[in-house]
Structure formats: C-alpha cells, structure tokens
Image (cartoon, rainbow, N blue to C red):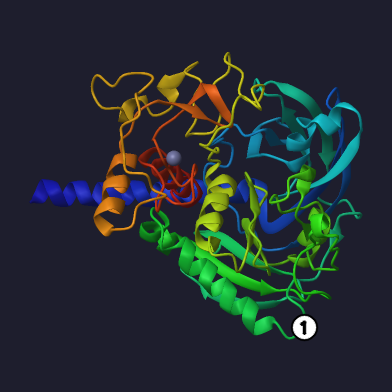
Amino acid sequence: MRLRRLFLSMCLVLTVTCHTLRAQQFDDYFTDQTLRLDFILAGNAAEQHIFYAGATSYAGWAGRRNHLSEIMLRGNGQLFMRDHRSQQLIYTHTFSTLFQEWVSTEEATRTSRSFEATFQVPYPKDSVDITLCLLDTHGQPKTTYSQTIDPKDILIRKVEPSDGTLRTLKANGKPSECVDIVIVAEGYAEGETDKFFSDAQRAYDALFAHEPFLSLQDRFNVVACYLPSKDSGPSIPHHHIWHTTACQSHFDTFYTDRYLTTSSLFRLSDSLNGIPYEHIIVLANTGNYGGGGIYNQLTLTTSDHRTFSQVLVHEFGHEYGGLGDEYFYDDQYESIYPADTEPWEPNLTTLHDFSKKWADMLPVNCAIPTPPAKIPDYRKARTAKEWKAIDEATQRIGVFEGGGYQSKGVYRPAQECRMKINEVTHFCPVCTRALIRMTDFYTRP
Ligand SMILES: [Zn+2]
C-alpha cells in the first residue's frame, strides 16, 4: 500500500511538472490570441504559386497547446512557424486545399486560377518565420513560400468579434482543452433562424450518435453560428440558380453536380472572427444531395437530404480525421496515389510502407490483398438480422484492393466503411482508431 501511495504521489508530481512544462512552452512563444494568415494559391497543373494576402488578429486561441511542433498527418500542405532568432520550430499545421484538388483536374491543364486559403495560428510574442508548403502527390514540396511576421506589425488588422448569432450546443471545457467546432448557417434567410438552430442541433446529434465521437463527446465544444443570407438555399449552377448567401457556397464544384464547396474562405473566416473554433461545419439549407470535406479546412453538408446524417459524418471524417475516400472507380484518377508513395491518409495504403498503417491490426495470416467475403447485399437488406450480418462482416479488418478512387494499386482496411458507402452505419476499425488518435492529439498531452 505504501509503495502504491508513493507511486501515486510520484505520478502526481510528474503530472504537475509536465503540465508546468507544457504551459511554459506555449507561454514562452505565444500569447492567448489568434493570428489569422490569409494567402492566395494560384497557378495551373504545371506550376503553382503562393501569395501572402494579409493578417488579422483577435483575442483568444482555441487551438491545441500541446504537440505544437508535431505533425499528426502529412496532409497535402504544411505550415511551419519558426522563431526568427533561434529558428526553432514552434508550431506546425497540416492541411489540404481545394486549389490542390483543382490542380489535378483537366481544366487546370488549360487554364490558371487562384483560390483563397486561410490559417489560424497562435499569436507569437516575437518575430517568426512562416513557411507555407504545398506538396505533390509524392509528398514532396512542390511550392514553398516563406516570410517573416513581426507580431508588432501595425498592418496586422485587429478585428472585432463576429456579429453572428451564437448558440452553444455543447460546452465541455475551455477552448484550450477541447476540440472546438463551429456549425455555420449557409443559405438561411431572415426568418429561418429557428430552422437553422434546429438543423444545427440535428447535425450535432448525428455526429455524436456515431462512434468514436459518441465516446469522445466530452472532449468537444460545439457552437452554432447563425449568419443571415439574402436568399434561401445555396447556389445550384446546374439548375441555373445563383443565390446571395452568407458563405457563397455552390454545387457543381469542378463541374461535379453534387460537389458542394465554397471558394470564399476570406469572407467565411471574417464572419467567424473571435469565435473559438478549430473546425468548421458549413450547414447548407437545402434538400439536395451533396457536400464536401477538406482536411483541416472545412466540412460542407446539406441540411434536409435523407442521407444528411451519413454525409455529414463522412465529410467530417475527411475534414477532421484526414480520412481518405475508400470508394473507387475504374482507374479514373490513377495518378492521385502513385505506387511509390505511401498515402498520408490513415485508411489508405499503396503497400509502399504499410507498416505505418494498420499492419498491427491485421489478423494473423491475413492474405494481402484480402479476398472479399460474401456478405448480404446492403441494397436488399431489410431485417435487423441482415443488417447485423453486414455490420459484422464490414468490421473485418484486411487489406482490400480498391480505394482512393482507384480500383487497382490502392487498398482499404474494410470491405465497407462510412468512408466508402452511406449505407454502412459506422466507421471501420482503422478509421475509428485514426479519429481517436486525432482527438488525443488535440486534447491530450
Ligand atoms: Zn474506414
């Protein structure tokens, strides 16, 4: 008993010491403010450029205070902040962008375009060197931009908090201790405020009805932000509908009818200034099917389609967990995941460096590639027993060929998963672990 007490007291001392060290590390370099950095990403399939577009600041930093200089996932782009004098890396952030998706389209082989990108970083006490890097499909730097930021620069615009109408859906702790999500109204006209807050509550309920979010829900803060739109509903170009809305979102991104995104990231970020958030869910007021999720940028989803819940969770899986799509076509996008590079998405592999993926979760003597099992057709499943059989079969971990839009050369961890089809009710075990790890990264020492 005495030994146990001694051990416990040692743990307490160590814990206090570690907390003190962590606090000092953040406080050594940063103040409790947010620095928002805006960039223009421009170019075409052959070459890309990065331009600094300005900075703003406001009180409070809602992001992580641990693992400041660590990277959880490589992403398609990286931001590094180094102390200018010592060149010590003091903060990193990884992300993907709509621009990089566009660069892979046919349109980018014949035109040049520019896209907005905005990043929130903790406000430095001293001058820092910011480096923004866009990676190619091999994970190699394709475009890099660096500049020194002086925190005393008088042109860093100090902004007032958003005048959006806020409603807290869940408050579990300080923003510095929790993952902070803001659900933003898009295409809700004056008079649709109540509908938005009702829809936002449904979004919250849908997300946290799913594991692992259900078990992790005490580590999240969620706030809904009503922004008025002149028109009701997002723009639908294939129906020749262009609306004036808070986030200027639209379907038909890259001429794909169901791909709902917004290119107006500066405007969106302006409308959220001062709200403690790390992740954005834009809730578009429409019954149309569609959505989009970009890693560490934003999730878009529609409010009234019958698959609302599934699409929201799938897209948030992209944005929050960096999960890749597990569905595939007939080699339509074969250049996205080259065979000589391990994808950074935790639920896809080319087998180039599989040991870093879910090799530790495979059953003994698992065949690679894993032959798919015969499972009931989910389209014909009607009874609870049939659904249970599908659920159990789809939780079997393997290395199934086909994923990341490619039928060959890319492998996924389960036959079916929320990142593959809407009909499955859950994430596969590998996606689940990835989401737990990401949440730990944000909220645990
Ligand atoms: Zn999965």
58 left or right, relative to 172:
right
Front-lying residue, 438 or 21: 438
- Residue beneath the point at 79% across and 42% down: 127
Q: Which residue extends farthest bottom? A: 191
- Residue beneath the point at 81% across and 59% down: 239
Amino acid on which disc 1 is placed: Glu
Q: In the image, residue 393 lies at what x, y percent?
A: 29, 40
- Residue beneath the point at 49% across and 34% down: 346
Q: Is residue 166 above or below residue 402?
A: below
Q: Is residue 132 above or below residue 194?
A: above
Question: Dividing the picture into quarters, in which one does residue 60 lie?
Answer: bottom right
Q: Which residue extends farthest left? A: 1
Q: Is residue 88 above or below residue 273?
A: above
Res. 64 visible in picture: no
- Helix, strand or loop at label 1? It is loop
Q: Quadrant of ligand 1?
A: top left
Residue behind mark 1: 190
404 left or right, relative to 291:
left
Front-lying residue, 373 or 103: 373
Q: Is residue 27 above or below residue 106?
A: below
Front-lying residue, 248 or 8: 248
Res. 196 visible in picture: yes
Q: In the image, residue 98 lies at what x, y percent?
A: 74, 42
- Ligand 1 contact, mark 1 (Cβ < 8 Å): no
Q: In the image, residue 299 lies at what x, y percent?
A: 63, 54
Question: How would you rate the neighbour count of disc 1 (Cα within 10 Å): few for under 14, some for 14-19, many for 20 or more?
Answer: few
- Residue beneath the point at 78% across and 57% down: 250
Q: In the image, residue 432 lies at what x, y percent?
A: 40, 45
Front-lying residue, 166 or 232: 232
